[in-house]
Image: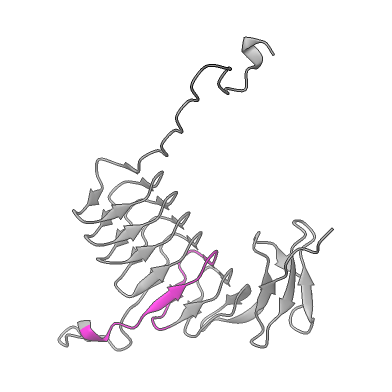
Amino acid sequence: MTAAESDGSAHPGQPAEPERAPPAAWVHPSAVVDDGAVLGAGTKIWHFVHVCSGASIGPGCVLGQNVFVAPNVQIGAGCKLQNNVSIYVGVTLEDEVFVGPSAVFTNVMNPRAHVNRRDQFAGTLIRRRATIGANATIVCGTTLGEGAFVAAGAVVTKDVPPRVLVQGCPAEPAGWRCDCGEALAGWPAAAEAACAPCGSTYAVRPDGGLDLKAPEAD
């Protein structure tokens, strides 16, 4: 192997190179990250973002312009929050969640300006790999199942099963989506579904959602 073909491994008698640390989080100068907030490695915080004290953002996330993250909010690894999204107290995002631009979360069911309901925040849980389209509204107290897909402009008022597409106002089930994002045939009567582009297969749950099947052994 010539020098130009070297794979970077140490030669006999030479010490191995130490593992490189993952890149630190990057924060745009216009953003505000309060003391006590935790940013994971490789996360990017763009213009005019505000991350409050106690919030935890996992590694590899991207927070677009004008995102707000409230105190003590938990955001998992690999999430993408597009411009103008506010994650309020009571909202939790698991890993690899996509939130489209100007999507809205609430945290009080019956707000009044003159009534303090800070002790009545209703939790909202967004499970792993869920997608929320632009301008969608997620009413508090709901759970989006793993891989759930909320269409742009939809208003979600109840739980969404795993990998179910919902659309409209109020949002209603309208199909299935693969973890890769492709539409799946068979809705709503099939007992299983398969994705031609990526090869994933799913079993239908009693609630109409989909569970990913384990790959068959060779």
Q: Is residue 175 visible?
A: no
- Quadrant of the image occupied by residue 23: top left
Between 167 and 149, the one nearer to me in the picture: 149
Q: Which of 142 and 165 is in front in this view?
A: 142
The image quarter in which residue 190 lies: bottom right
Q: Nearer the viewer, residue 95 or 139?
A: 95
186 in relation to 135, above or below: below
| Above or below, comparing residue 1 to residue 43 in the picture | above
Percent across and percent down for residue 18 are 45, 29
Q: Is residue 99 left or right of residue 204?
A: left
Q: Which residue lies furthest to the top in this view?
A: 2
Residue at 65% x, 79% y is 209
What x and y, as percent, mark residue 141? 40, 84
Residue 67: give x, y in percent of width and height: 33, 57
> Which residues, given as a range, are shown in magenta?
119-141
Residue farthest to the left? 114
For residue 27, side relative to residue 53 (left or right):
right
61 displayed left or right of 154: left
Residue found at the far right of this picture: 218
Residue at image x 35%, y 43%? 25
Q: Residue 140 colored magenta? A: yes
